[in-house]
Image (cartoon, helix red, strand yellow):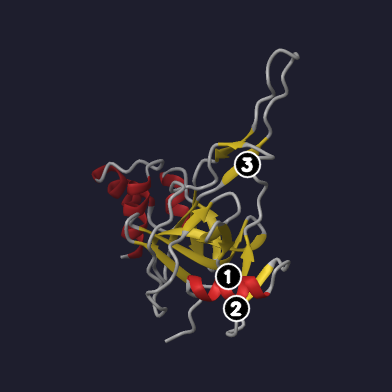
Amino acid sequence: MKKIILVLFGSISLLINGQIGNENISYSTGNFFMKANRPSTKEYIVDGSPYSNGDQFNKVIIKDYSKNVQDLRYNAYEDEMEFKNGDELFYANKENNLKIHFPTLNKTYKCFNYNYDGKSKLGYLVVLVDSPKYSFFKREKVELLRGEKSPNAYSKDANDYYAKEKDLYLVSKNNILFKFPKNIGEASEFFSVDKKEMESFVKSNKINFNKEIDMVKLVEFINK
């Protein structure tokens, strides 16, 4: 069995107590956990939530790793998996090609080095179709927007707030990610499929290029 990437709460507590003042918490296997430092709500209030699945922590399953890992939640603003120890938040260390499955959410996140729009990044994407031919992913992202200043002294300034961006759907091709095609013409060209065959499948299955479930059906069809 591989080394556990997330250590038990008690072990972390001992290490934290022994390394007060450090931003990173290390342990004997050499892995690291970064303290999730964010402004205190007492000093700096931000409306909304940075979490795409809600604020709760959920059980996870990670193949070939111990079952005794912390409950996690995905922070879509920071692109990090968070866990809690006492009253403090920590980010789990990122590992290339690591898959984290949330059974209660029926959702799997993959952490990997990917290339999109000319940029490389090590981050998390939701796995929608996992295939050696064409894999299909969803990027969840939250941005922090500035609140508006009050135009007068009689009302308060609006707080900064988290706003969810529109989900971005990406297809892998030759280890590079591309936006999902917008229509039949783009799809037939991108997937190198005869346009008439593509039209027939789209029509018979009533494929909507803006619906996730239909996009999954199309990629699964292409992969057959």
Disc 1 element: loop
Most extreme residue toward the left is: 204
Most extreme residue toward the bottom is: 1
Q: Residue at x 30, y 65 (%)?
A: 224
Do the numbered discs 3 and 1 sit on residues whose CB atoms are within 8 Å?
no
Position of residue 17 in the picture relative to residue 112 (left or right)? right
Q: Amino acid at mark 2?
A: Asn
Do the numbered discs 1 and 2 sit on residues whose CB atoms are within 8 Å?
yes
- Residue 41: which numbered mark, if any? 3
Of residue 215 and residue 13, the one placed in the foreground of this image is 13
Disc 2 or disc 3, which is closer to the eye?
A: 3
Task: Give the CA separation, mark 1 to mark 2.
Answer: 7 Å
Residue 211: % across, % down: 37, 42
Which of the two discs, 1 and 2, labels the residue nearer the N terminus? 2
Q: Residue at x 60, y 78 (%)?
A: 31
Q: Amino acid at mark 3?
A: Thr
Are there few (<14), some (14-19), or many (20+) residues within 10 Å of tag 2? some
What count of labels does the image hold? 3
Position of residue 211 in the picture relative to residue 79 (left or right)? left
Which of the two discs, 2 and 3, labels the residue nearer the N terminus? 2
- Residue named by callout 1: 93
- Residue named by callout 2: 31
Are there few (<14), some (14-19), or many (20+) residues within 10 Å of tag 3? few
Vertical placement of 84 versus 68: above or below? above
- Is residue 198 something that shows in the picture? yes
Are there few (<14), some (14-19), or many (20+) residues within 10 Å of tag 1? some
